[in-house]
Amino acid sequence: MSFGQIIVDARRKARISQKQLAARIKKEDGTQISPQYLNDIERDRRNPPSEYLIRQFAKELALAEEYLILAAGTLPSELRARLTDSDPKSVVRAFRAFRKNIK
């Protein structure tokens, strides 16, 4: 399932309109995202948003942040930092363990 599909499904389950959800999601400058921007995200017309916005979507839609961040095709920033500072063999072991546990 794509990032946009996850958002639209969770929004509908929460019985929230696009306009209502867009009003709750704030950009870093404090302004809200537009309903059109949310519509574009839900229809996969845009790349997934920043981790800053993803965390808000997770909170508003009662979704796990990690799940949304992964659906967006990235890793949480704190994990990315740890991985780039790690020994390459440790990273490979971590990804192998991850793959083994995901079914």
Image: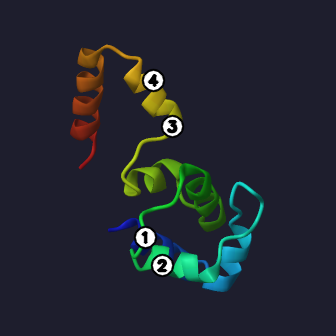
Q: Is residue 13 visible?
A: no
Q: Residue furthest top?
A: 87
3 or 4: tag closer to the N-terminus = 3
Q: Which is closer to the viewer, label 4 or label 1? A: 1
- Seen at 73% across and 75% down, the residue is 23
Query: Which one is nearer the viewer's eye here, 64 or 28?
Result: 28
Callouts 1 and 2 close, C-beta under 8 Å: yes
Q: Quadrant of residue 26?
A: bottom right
Helix or strand or loop: what does disc 4 sit on? helix
> Which residue position holds label 3?
77
Q: Is residue 99 visible?
A: yes
In this rendering, the answer to whether 72 lies above or below 80 is below
Q: Which is closer to the viewer, label 1 or label 3? A: 1
Q: Classify 10 Å Cα crowding around label 3: few (below 14), some (14-19), many (20 and above).
A: few
**Residue 29, x across and y down, in percent:** 75, 57
3D distance between C-alphas at marks 3 and 2: 24 Å
Callouts 4 and 2 close, C-beta under 8 Å: no
Q: Quadrant of residue 93?
A: top left
Helix or strand or loop: what does disc 1 sit on? loop
3 or 2: tag closer to the N-terminus = 2
Horizontal arrangement in the rendering, residue 93 relative to residue 24 (left or right): left
Q: Residue furthest right?
A: 30
4 or 1: tag closer to the N-terminus = 1
> Which residue position holds label 2?
40
3D distance between C-alphas at marks 4 and 2: 32 Å
